Image (cartoon, rainbow, N blue to C red):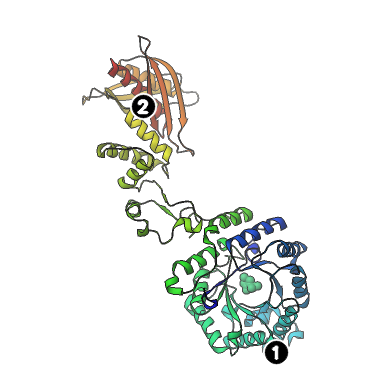
């Protein structure tokens, strides 16, 4: 990859990312994350803002000492004491960068430099800001050759003034110039043009690399980052999972994978080892306590999950029909066909085959109808549910008795009662019966005994949840003993445990009578 084609990835999870409300990382956690960022292959790690706290200073110092590979960067305002603190914290880094700068939009200058010492008029204050920027770059140069200057709030800045300050800081020695859309105000088309306008209008622009640093207030941080790249920016500033101040920063995983997947369009790439993306995302989510939404691009739990009939069908024929990246390319567990009420027969059959079941078309139809019943009650049908359904279906021998209807009433202080309607020997007219019992299952069993005229002794009864969650399938197993002392086992599966219990008892009775 030539220098022109390489996009430098500047990760600011440890600095801007940690500015996300309610988060705070310990020094050791920061070191662990910086080590993972190095494994991920980022070019620059912004490790912190040393003047802001002793812990930040210590973290930058420790990361500088321990982490090799990426350039270690520290943030500072365009203020001497900040720059000196950054320089001191970075002392042990093999490659170091100071990132200094100031607010350059009229609103920032007018509001932050109110004091007359910065000048009386806005124009005087703006001239003073250029002077401060130049001095800051020169001071940072005393610590490292690699100095980045940020023009905060560039997205809302006066363009001619922005061109002027950029020219001045490059002349002072800034090697990278950061054009942040600090407030997430820009529109991609406009932001992209801003980058190419700077490159085309600033006379010494060729001497620096332009960086984009976009916030997500209007949900356009990644789009603006990519527009910047398309218009000549060669560094992108991002955070893992897009964490950061307010609505956050451009997400590293989305920006990097957009550039890689659409190399045909951008004609550039990064050196990120994308297989580490998922792991890094989990680490950041765990450390900061900020969940990753299931539908989050690249690293979300559903990013490679297919559910609807049409999609599953297409995906199984050729994954490229519905996937533009492979999950393993970003370190995600493999694509998943999630079985839900929208899954078609093809998706179910595929899963059955994966689980080792060979089913005929007629068997598939029966299992599919039962699967739909379960899927209607549960958000997701798991492999264990399917195994239980198949087992339940395959165990059914001759259906002398078929449970058509079951109603049970029970509760504290009431006598448990059950009524059943059963089809006998396939006859149209059902047999009905009602009974009381010690509990709802006992009442149901008594009603079944009356309806069938069969009263084997109950030897064993167990019920277990097949999967987790309150809508889990319950699987009941019963053993009955006939009058000759022979045991018969019956099983029943349902999301309703009383129904599962009744089905298991009827199954055992059917086995008993069909044997005879
Ligand atoms: O958003 C911003 O402008 C910043 C700067 C400090 C680079 O985070
Ligand atoms: Zn920022």
Which mark, residue 503? Answer: 2
Label 2 beta carbon within 8 A of ligand 2? no
Which residue does the image show at 42% across and 40% down from the upper left? 383
Which residue does the image show at 55% across and 85% down from the upper left? 199
Whole-percent x and y of residue 313? 32, 52
Relative to 481, is 105 above or below? Answer: below
Q: Choose between 300 and 95: the one closer to the eye.
A: 95
Relative to 322, is 341 above or below? Answer: above
Disc 1 to disc 2, C-alpha distance? 86 Å
Q: Residues within 10 Å of mark 2 (few under 14, many from 20)?
A: many
Which mark, residue 437? Answer: none
Whole-percent x and y of residue 382? 43, 41
Q: Name the N-terminal-most of marks 1 and 2.
A: 1
Secondary structure beneath label 2: helix
Relative to 68, is 188 above or below? Answer: below
Residue 177 seen in render:
yes
Whole-percent x and y of residue 90? 74, 69
Image side of residue 417 versus residue 34, left or right: left
Give the residue at the far left of this rendering. 428
Relative to 122, is 271 above or below? Answer: above
Q: Residues within 10 Å of mark 1 (few under 14, many from 20)?
A: few
Name the residue that disc number 1 marks. Answer: 124
Residue 24 seen in render:
no
- Name the image quarter holding residue 216: bottom right
- Name the image quarter holding residue 182: bottom right
């Amino acid at each position: 990859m030539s220098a022109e084609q390489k996009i430098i990835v500047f990760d600011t999870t440890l600095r801007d990312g940690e500015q996300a409300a309610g988060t705070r990382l310990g020094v050791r956690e920061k070191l662990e994350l910086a080590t993972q960022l190095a494994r991920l292959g980022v070019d620059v790690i912004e490790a912190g803002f040393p003047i802001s706290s002793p812990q930040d200073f210590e973290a930058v110092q420790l990361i500088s000492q321990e982490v090799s590979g990426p350039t270690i960067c520290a943030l500072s305002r365009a203020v001497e004491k900040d720059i000196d603190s950054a320089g001191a914290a970075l002392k042990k880094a093999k490659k170091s960068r100071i990132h200094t700068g100031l607010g350059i939009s009229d609103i920032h200058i007018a509001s932050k430099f109110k004091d007359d010492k910065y000048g009386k008029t806005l124009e005087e204050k703006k001239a003073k800001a250029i002077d401060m920027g130049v001095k800051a770059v020169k001071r940072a140069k005393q610590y490292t050759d690699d100095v980045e200057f940020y023009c905060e709030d560039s997205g809302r800045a006066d363009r001619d003034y922005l061109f002027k300050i950029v020219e001045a800081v490059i002349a002072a020695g800034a090697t990278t110039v950061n054009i942040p859309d600090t407030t997430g105000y820009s529109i991609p088309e406009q932001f992209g043009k801003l980058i190419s306008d700077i490159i085309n209008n600033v006379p010494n622009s060729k001497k620096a690399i332009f960086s984009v640093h976009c916030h997500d207030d209007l949900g356009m941080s990644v789009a603006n980052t990519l527009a910047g790249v398309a218009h000549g920016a060669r560094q992108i500033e991002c955070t893992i999972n897009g964490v950061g101040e307010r609505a956050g920063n451009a997400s590293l995983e989305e920006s990097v994978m957009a550039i890689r997947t659409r190399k045909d369009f951008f004609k550039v790439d990064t050196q990120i080892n994308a297989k580490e993306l998922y792991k890094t995302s989990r680490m950041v989510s765990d450390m900061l306590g900020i969940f990753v939404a299931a539908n989050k691009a690249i690293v979300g739990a559903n990013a490679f999950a297919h559910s609807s009939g049409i999609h599953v069908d297409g995906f199984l024929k050729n994954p490229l029909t519905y996937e533009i990246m492979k999950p393993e390319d970003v370190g995600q567990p493999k694509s998943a066909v999630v079985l839900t009420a929208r899954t078609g027969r093809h998706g179910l059959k595929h899963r059955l085959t994966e689980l080792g079941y060979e089913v005929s078309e007629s068997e598939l139809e029966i299992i599919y109808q039962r699967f739909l019943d379960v899927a209607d009650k549960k958000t997701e049908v798991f492999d264990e549910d399917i195994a239980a359904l198949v087992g339940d279906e395959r165990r059914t021998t001759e259906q002398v008795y078929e449970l058509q209807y079951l109603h049970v009433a029970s509760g504290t202080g009431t006598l448990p009662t059950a009524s059943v309607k059963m089809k006998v020997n396939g006859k149209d007219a059902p047999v009905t019966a009602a009974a009381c019992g010690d509990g709802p299952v006992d009442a149901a069993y008594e009603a079944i005994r009356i309806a069938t005229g069969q009263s084997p002794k109950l030897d064993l009864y167990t019920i277990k949840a097949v999967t987790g969650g309150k809508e889990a399938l319950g699987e009941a197993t019963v053993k009955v003993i006939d009058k000759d002392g022979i045991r018969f086992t019956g099983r029943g599966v349902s999301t309703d445990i009383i129904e599962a219990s009744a089905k298991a008892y009827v199954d055992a009775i059917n086995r008993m009578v069909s044997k005879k």
